[in-house]
Image (tube, rainbow, N blue to C red):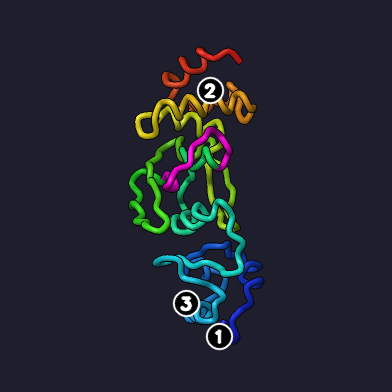
Amino acid sequence: MTGAPRPPDQLREAGLGSFFRPRDAEMVGITYRELRRLEADGVVEREARGLYRRTDADLTRFHTIAAVCARVPDAIVCLLTALVVHEIGTQLPREVWIAIPQGNRTPILTTPSARVMRFSGASLRYGVVDTDFEGVPARITSPARTVVDCFRFRNRIGRDIAHEALDDVLRDGRASVAEIWRAAIACRAKSLLGPALDARSY
């Protein structure tokens, strides 16, 4: 488009979330030249290198997650950040925890910052669901899968957090023993979850 800049509601209707990259804008017909004009007019703001924000967007408590997912579109929100989204446990991580495919280039993020994990094989697919944060397309591990990951990476996040997550999802019914066990099988974590599940009588 080379005419007058689009109003904010048209950016939203074009499918741009609260945060987006220049290439996302190009995919909906907004050239880089027009993007700069939108920035000059205060319709969008540059948040960081390669990341823009619609100024009309209503920021939620997940705005940092939205920003990271916009910067790393192949990321999977996981572990401590997935716990927060699913309202499991009491964690309040300072970083956004994401996973990317093994072998992918590690994204360099400073604002906002992210903790990057590596998934491969079934871990990239099982229990990973599509969602969005403030209109930004994203993926996240399900409650059952998140619990399994907490045990898989217990040395990174702490054993107490893993057990707290397990107790919380079972107590509140966010995931069943069967769902957690299936996720453990898919992610080759039976030996980690078996004793923990056996120790609890639900």
Q: Which residue is mark 1?
A: 2
Q: What crowding class fits label 1: few (fewer than 14 Cα within 10 Å), some (14-19), or many (20 or more)?
A: few
Please provide the residue range marked out in magenta.
Answer: 85-99
Q: Earlier in the sequence, mark 3 or mark 2?
A: 3
Q: Amino acid at mark 2?
A: Trp
Query: Residue, x 54% and y 77% (percent of image)?
Result: 42
Which quarter shows the N terminus? bottom right
Q: Which residue is mark 3?
A: 32
Residue 21 in the figure: left or right of residue 137: left
Across and down, in percent, residue 105 comes to: 33, 52
Please say whether residue 175 is visible from this viewpoint: yes
Query: Residue, x 45% and y 36% (percent of image)?
Result: 123
Q: Earlier in the sequence, mark 1 or mark 2?
A: 1
Across and down, in percent, residue 65 comes to: 50, 52
Query: Residue, x 61% and y 15% (percent of image)?
Result: 202
Asked whether the residues under the numbered discs 3 and 1 touch, taking CB atoms below 8 Å apart as contact, a structural biologist would say no
Please say whether residue 188 is visible from this viewpoint: no
- As measured in the structure, the alpha-carbon distance from the residue carrying label 1 to the one carrying label 2 is 55 Å
Q: Which residue is mark 2?
A: 181
Query: Residue, x 62% and y 73% (percent of image)?
Result: 8
